[in-house]
Image (tube, rainbow, N blue to C red):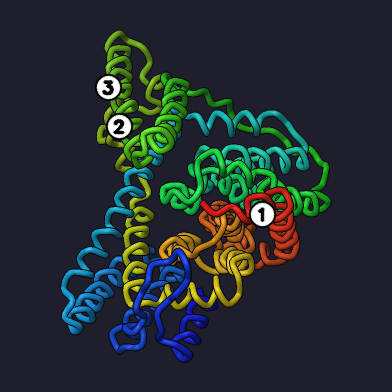
Amino acid sequence: MKHLLLSVMLCLLGSSSVLANEGAPQVDTVLASTDLGYLALILFIAAYALVILEEKIHLRKSKPVLLAAGIIWILVALAYAALGDHETPEVAIRHNLIEYVELFLFLLSAMTYINALTERNVFQALRSWLVLKGFTLRTVFWITGLLAFLISPIADNLTTALLMGAVVMAVARDNAKFVVVACINIVVGANAGGAFSPFGDITTLMVWQKGRVDFIEFFAIFLPSLVNWLVPALIMSFAVPKERPETHGEMVTMKVGARRIMFLFLLTIVTAVCFHQYLNLPPAVGMMLGFGYLAFFGFFLKRQELRAMTTGDNPLDITGHNVEAHGHDAPGFDLFRKVAKAEWDTLLFFYGVILCVGGLSQFGYLALASNYFYTDLGPTWANVLVGIMSAVIDNIPVMFAVLTMNPHMSHGQWLLVTLTAGVGGSLLSIGSAAGVGLMGTARGKYTFGQHLKWTWAIALGYAASIWLHLIVNAHHMNDFH
């Protein structure tokens, strides 16, 4: 982000003109050089500095951006009021709120399904199976990386990374060298796998919901995403010993209803895709219909479990916990307990980011940045830099800024920015939710410094994926639609 902000300031010094990029909205950037504009920019920088320092100061990332978002829109309203315009801020903020609500409802439904699958022991069963198989460390390295790549397009990359990270820690917790390369492999695999599916990464989801790329068309970047993971994985695999660790632990079985919830989740994904592709309705509406599937099934599942308890069946076989010891956690499947366990800090963080970026857009900063990046540098280099910036900060505000800029570029370039924003975060451990999550799981072993030692290998994969995309999707590069 520091590169983006530096570019913005350079543009401010050189121009306060109107952006004339074909296909982009005509935005008057005169407000960017006002005191209120500068104050809004400083507020956003300060808020995001606190977000980056979350692990150090233990301040939830949603709090500073929520505060900054409200103040920035006060400044927007005051700036436009000084020009005698009282309508534009209201129209603009309502547009931002609609975008947030669509994202919020989509993610809330997806998070609830993931929490339901977790409560039904789906991920725990997979983890215990892998741990008890007695694979060599090199086999575990490849299996966890491959599963991270394959699971993240359906589940989110953070959940996938945490699951595979738990497998690594259970298999070889005391082998620090293996833990480091295995965790890096998982982060790269999860981010790469999430890049070609709207259900695997928030940035891909935003591109899909905006209609820039159709659902099926994302699979055009499957091979570049695969190469993004394979190149560093092949390099790091030579650092993994072939020794076979001791197996320990017990086999975990899935609870009743687990397979049916998996089926309903897949049906929900199909529903969301059909709503968008065939009915021209927001995918979030389809996801909420899928939420309804789970709600009704949860009602019958809870009745089934309670009936089993009253007939004398062992409650531990059904609910997985001792009812008397957990009276506050009532027995049986409860949908709203799954809703309560959603990542509310993340959902509120998205609200703050969307409104902060939307406010800066009203001051004209994104128009200036778009002019500098996508006109002066050109879309290919601009999109490559988007991925690199995603390694420094979260890719969500970067991608939302690009979508708000709405640069006039080809279909192939939209696929490129989706790829780079999705996989660029792998360059640093703090560049993605998967990396940050695994630093907590493997605390003291997988660190920022340890990840940095392998950044060169990850960068080779990043460059190779871009090169492959420019070759295999060359026919999309001049496709404007």
Residue marked by disc 1: 184
Q: Amino acid at mark 2?
A: Leu
Residue marked by disc 3: 299
In what element is the residue under mark 3? helix
Does any portion of residue 135 appear in the rendered image? yes
Residue at image position (43%, 28%) is: 120
Q: Is residue 405 left or right of residue 247?
A: left
The residue lying toward the viewer, choosing from 122 and 365, is 365
The answer to whether 23 is drawn above or below residue 267 in the figure is: below
- Check disc 3: other Cα within 10 Å, few if <14, some if 14-19, many if 20+: some
Q: Position of residue 365 (x, y in %)?
A: 40, 77
Q: Amino acid at mark 3?
A: Phe
Residue marked by disc 2: 335
Distance from label 3 to label 1 (Cα)?
Answer: 41 Å
The residue lying toward the viewer, choosing from 52 and 418, is 418
Residue at image position (82%, 47%) is: 241
Q: Position of residue 429 (x, y in %)?
A: 59, 61
